[in-house]
């Protein structure tokens, strides 16, 4: 069977070899600890589950949802942006419901860019920005996030010839996979550049509500005039331990939000209304206490990971957000050599940095979304494996 030509352009799936190694260790009867995936281990708060249960009982919710998101959900998103970021949004023109932000990130690319267009994608980054630009037939400019710049890009380094052709610039702070954070001045710089060159600034705010040592992530839409050029993705997945629920929103520039909605109404039929009702309960029922508790849990785990890395001679500066620890491979190993080493010698899975882009080569990503006792065990095993090769 011959597939569409575009399928051949997709980057290879880099976890394939790692998956095989993990299977081999499992077959040998080893207990594997997986720090490779960023997916909260804690449950969704009870009141959100109860809201879903009540909403699921109502027959009116069993019919097709409103494709662009229920008025109540879009209202709740706008109210949340006002409360959390002091950003004003028109629910009907400047918000659209998404089946998780991954879906919206993918489809916004299809709404904005095609052959002859250019998309600026950070390296390393969440792989969907790149894969969708490729599928949509657009050209990609890799924007490095250097460790020396605390994983912030040098926007002045982007050539004029790229800026004049670019349709989208992706930014993701707090950042997956590096754990880096940006303050409002970075977003100010990005908004100014995008205004100058008529580029859509695409801000992925997946980790907005995780903050350590007093850090609180800003929204790109807090910049004056940002809405002229900015779309932001706000997902309930990571803040509320709701990755399986599939609910998020794209907010900001009405032209881009509207185009995304138009594209989506031609290919999906929205989020189950009962899930949207539960999302309204999540946003409306003062979530700040929950975010604080959740961040405290991740902060404690972060400290465990940082101390262990320090003891291995692989210390890193303390990240202020996300549940990722981004660290260099030991002994000059490549990313895939190092992830293989830890699977075979410690039965611990960490993600190879190279799967997030070329600049990620030589790095590893460990996720803190595993029970604390297992995380301690994982780093103990990694320390022991390191001690054996020193
Ligand atoms: C997890 C993640 C997403 C996907 O979130 P969903 O809303 O669950 O689709 C998007 N962007 C980044 C950077 C992520 O880490």
Image (cartoon, rainbow, N blue to C red):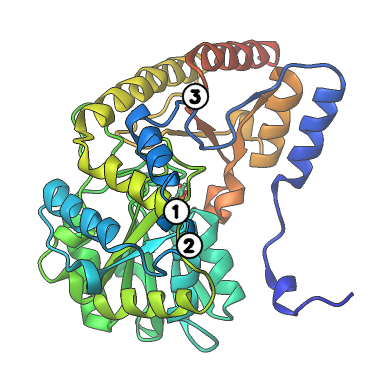
Q: Nearer the viewer, residue 14 or 204?
A: 204
Q: Which residue is mark 1?
A: 59
Q: Measured from the top left, where is residue 136 in percent x and y?
A: 57, 78
Give left or right: position of 263 versus 338.
Answer: left
Of all residues shown, which one is farthest toward the front? 59
Q: Are marks 1 and 2 in contact (CB under 8 Å)?
A: yes
Q: Is mark 2 within 8 Å of ligand 1?
A: no
Q: Which residue is mark 2?
A: 63
Against 380, residue 284 (above or below) is below
How would you rate the neighbour count of disc 1 (Cα within 10 Å): few for under 14, some for 14-19, many for 20 or more? few
Q: Earlier in the sequence, mark 1 or mark 3?
A: 1
Q: Residue at x 49, y 62 (%)?
A: 103
Q: Quadrant of residue 322?
A: top left
Q: Residue at x 59, y 81 (%)?
A: 137
Quadrant showing the N terminus: bottom right
Q: CA distance from mark 1 to mark 3?
A: 56 Å
Q: Measured from the top left, where is residue 124 in percent x and y?
A: 49, 53
Q: Residue at x 50, y 77 (%)?
A: 110
Does dot 2 land on a helix, a strand or a loop? loop
Q: Nearer the viewer, residue 384 or 128?
A: 128
Against 295, residue 234 (above or below) is below
Give left or right: position of 358 versus 160.
Answer: right
Disc number placed over residue 133 in the picture, else none: none
Disc number placed over residue 314 in the picture, else none: 3
Quadrant showing the C terminus: top right
How would you rate the neighbour count of disc 3 (Cα within 10 Å): few for under 14, some for 14-19, many for 20 or more? some
Does dot 3 land on a helix, a strand or a loop? loop
Q: Nearer the viewer, residue 75 or 152?
A: 75
How many numbered markers are drawn? 3
């Amino acid at each position: 069977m011959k597939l569409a030509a575009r399928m051949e352009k997709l980057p290879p799936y880099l976890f394939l070899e790692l998956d095989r190694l993990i299977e081999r260790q499992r077959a040998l009867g080893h207990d594997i600890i997986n720090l490779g995936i960023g997916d909260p281990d804690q449950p969704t708060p009870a009141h959100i589950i109860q809201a879903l249960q009540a909403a699921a009982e109502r027959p009116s919710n069993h019919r097709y949802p409103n494709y662009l998101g229920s008025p109540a959900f879009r209202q709740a998103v706008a109210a949340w942006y006002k409360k959390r970021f002091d950003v004003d949004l028109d629910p009907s023109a400047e918000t659209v419901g998404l089946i998780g932000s991954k879906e919206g990130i993918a489809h916004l690319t299809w709404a904005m860019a095609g052959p002859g267009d250019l998309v600026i994608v950070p390296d390393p980054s969440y792989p969907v920005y790149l894969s969708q630009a490729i599928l949509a037939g657009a050209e990609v400019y890799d924007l490095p996030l250097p460790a020396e710049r605390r994983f912030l890009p040098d926007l002045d380094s982007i050539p004029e010839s790229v800026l004049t052709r670019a349709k989208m610039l992706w930014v993701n702070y707090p950042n997956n996979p590096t754990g880096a954070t940006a303050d409002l001045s970075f977003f100010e710089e990005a908004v100014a550049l995008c205004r100058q060159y008529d580029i859509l600034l695409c801000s992925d705010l997946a980790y907005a509500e995780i903050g350590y040592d007093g850090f609180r992530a800003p929204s790109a839409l807090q910049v004056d005039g940002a809405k002229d050029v900015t779309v932001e993705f706000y997902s309930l997945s990571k803040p509320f331990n709701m990755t399986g629920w599939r609910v998020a929103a794209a907010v900001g520039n009405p032209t881009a939000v509207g185009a995304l909605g138009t594209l989506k109404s031609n290919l999906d039929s929205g989020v189950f209304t009962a899930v949207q009702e539960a999302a309204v309960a999540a946003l409306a029922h003062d979530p700040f206490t929950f975010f604080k508790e959740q961040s405290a849990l991740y902060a404690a785990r972060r400290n465990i990971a940082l101390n262990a890395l320090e003891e291995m001679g692989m210390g890193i500066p303390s990240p202020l957000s996300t549940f990722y620890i981004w660290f260099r491979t030991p002994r000059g190993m490549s990313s895939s050599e190092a992830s293989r080493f830890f699977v075979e010698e410690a039965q611990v899975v960490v993600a190879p940095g190279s799967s997030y882009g070329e600049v990620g080569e030589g790095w590893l990503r460990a996720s803190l979304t595993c029970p604390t006792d297992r995380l301690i065990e994982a780093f103990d095993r990694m320390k022991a494996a390191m001690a054996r090769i020193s």
